[in-house]
Amino acid sequence: MTAISLGELARLLDGQISGDGQILLTGADTLRDAKVGDITFLDNAKLLGKLAETKASAVVVPRDIQPDGIPFISVEHVQAAFAKIVAMFRPPVHESTPGIHPTAVISPTAQLGEHVDVQAHAVIGDHVQIGSGTKIHAGVRIMAGCKLGENVVLFPNVVLYENTVVGARSIIHANAVLGAYGFGYHLVNGCHRLSAQLGNVVIGEDVEIGACTTVDRGTYGATVVGDGTKIDNQVMIAHNCRLGRHNMICSQVGIAGSTTTGDYVVMAGQVGVRDHVHIGTGAMLGAKAGVMNDVPDGAAYLGIPATPERQQMLIQAALHRLPELKKQLKTLQRLVDHVAQIAPVFANQQEAA
């Protein structure tokens, strides 16, 4: 079991220690799950009350938080520091010796760079190009003509259809499919005929794509995901889409064909975007937003159909008042009915007078 003193850990993190530096630490965990001998972390002052409940022996905090009753290390970036601690106590497990597994099937026309790791039952097709340091996990299928940059990681059972391009340092998680046919059909003589599927998928550098996500090929050109974009699990990106740089696309988002985005767009969980719209740079789409029209740069849109945040707040406020308004409407209706009943009597009295 790895053990390290609090003081030594503070030096490794370039942090400032408060408390007994001789405390020995043997693990790291969250506030809720930490045990005696563990170090934990706190990155928000709102959670200070939780420290009284934790069994941890020490805590990592940002420099502007000074907790009482527990030794702590102050650092500039809590999450980064705690990640280093966890990696030290729980180093990654290497599944196998790097190299080409004997059950892998690699075309003689494929070109592999130095230090490429290909695990069991992976299949690499004709004229594929793979950059140095790339890791191909078990069961991956890379079809003809694909190009992978340096230090790419493809997790088990990823499928790259022909001519897919993946930029350097990108990570594709298990069961993702890049380059499948787009959902495009023409009605011919009463039958749906598949439209042209002559394009491909181009993934930029430093992109991460989650498990079971699909990115369809373009009809004639490329479906593009820009550098630095991060895509969560179970996302669907349709044919001819062009996503900008550093987008954040959360779980179960669906983006219809020929949609484009600027840079630094955020789409929360289960957002749905119709085809042929543009989402501007820096725009944010709230969870389950149904986007029917273009979204301007920097805008925040919510709801179904999606509208600007302020407008949606007014709509929601009005919806919350509907039960009260319904009661008022019933009261008004009773008054109208009463007036309708007495109006003829009143009219006759006026005529008699």
Image: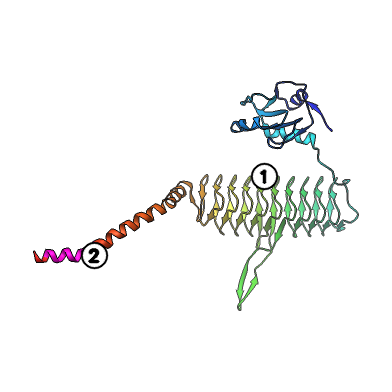
Q: Residue furthest bottom?
A: 189
Secondary structure mostly seen in the magenta stretch: helix
Decide if residue 100 is on the left or right side of residue 73. right
Q: Residue furthest left?
A: 353
Q: Circle 1 sits on which residue?
A: 228
Instruction: Give the tally of numbered discs.
Output: 2
Q: Which mark is residue 341?
A: 2
For mark 1, give the secondary structure: loop
Which mark's residue is nearer the viewer, 1 or 2? 2
Residue drawn where x is 76% and y is 35% of the image:
86
Q: Which residue occupies the foreground of this view, 59 or 249?
A: 59
Q: Where is residue 283 shown, x and y percent of the image?
A: 54, 46
Residue drawn where x is 61% and y is 31% of the image:
49
Magenta residues (range): 339-350
- Mark 1 and mark 2: span between their CA atoms? 71 Å
Q: Which residue occupies the foreground of this view, 131 or 306?
A: 306
Q: Is residue 165 above or below residue 187?
A: above
Residue type at the position of mark 2: Gln
Q: Is residue 330 above or below residue 96?
A: below
Residue type at the position of mark 1: Gly
